[in-house]
Amino acid sequence: AQSVSQHNHHVILSEAASLELGCNYSYGGTVNLFWYVQYPGQHLQLLLKYFSGDPLVKGIKGFEAEFIKSKFSFNLRKPSVQWSDTAEYFCAVNARSSNTGKLIFGQGTTLQVKP
Amino acid sequence: NAGVMQNPRHLVRRRGQEARLRCSPMKGHSHVYWYRQLPEEGLKFMVYLQKENIIDESGMPKERFSAEFPKEGPSILRIQQVVRGDSAAYFCASSPSRGTGNTGELFFGEGSRLTVL
């Protein structure tokens, strides 16, 4: 069965600090990978996604993620965080072979950016 | 994405009552997914539906929970005889049909927060 693990449950950073959130998945086949963000009181929004090609993908608001197949990882990075990045971040995966399209989510990481 | 509409946004029920949560997918989307988010946990898949069909209900509790997506109208997640452990945020997501630009991305609603007293 697929699973997704996010190592950091709660991260506190000061503005301008660099961010890296870890995400590992377990699945032997080909996967699509996603990072979603949930700002306080809002719905989940897609930050970025990886399907194929360049393993370094860029998303909205200066975020990027790198797919490392050998490590089953898809870590999220941002060189300099802002207070407005305070939110909950979810890594998700679906199996390319799946006929359901359902996403399996990690448990989420709460990011708090101090001004 | 504001296109997926969920209501009610907040629902309070007493133990033993029924909860009905509604979800209207984005226009043009025929696939609906329900997820549950318990406090301090991530989103757990519950059920995947297409119009008039349940495709995958592997995440649904065996009792008291049911879901439907009728030909007309919104998808409904129904919880009978609610218990305190059902208190959670329930998120609906939708996606377009396979082969019509589906990229695997799910579009989420703002969630329905159920509180069981």
Image: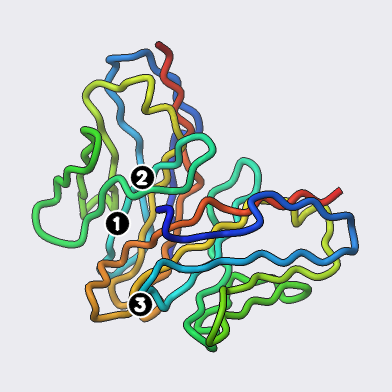
Local crowd at mark 2 within 10 Å, few (<14), some, or many (≥20)? Answer: many
Which residue is located at x 29 percent, y 41 percent?
A75
Mark 1 or 2: the one toward you: 1
Residue on which the image places disc 3: A98
- First in sequence, mark 3 or 1: give its number: 1
Point out residue A19 in the picture as x, y percentages from the top left corner: 30, 26
Q: Residue at x 82, y 67 (%)?
A: B18
The span from disc 3 to disc 1 (Cα, nearest Å) is 13 Å
Left or right of B20 in this view: B52 = left
Tag 3 near tag 2, CB within 8 Å: no
Query: From the viewer's perspective, is the residue at label 3 or at label 2 nearer?
Result: 3
Q: Which percent across, then down, holds residue B53? A: 53, 88
- In this rendering, is residue B115 above or below A95? above
Crowd band around label 3 with a 10 angstrom C-alpha radius: few (<14), some (14–19), many (20+)? few
**Amino acid bearing label 3:** Ser
Q: Disc 1 designates what residue?
A: A33
Residue depicted at x 61% and y 80%: B68
Q: Amino acid at mark 1?
A: Leu
Residue that numbered label 2 is attached to:
A23
Q: Amino acid at mark 2?
A: Cys
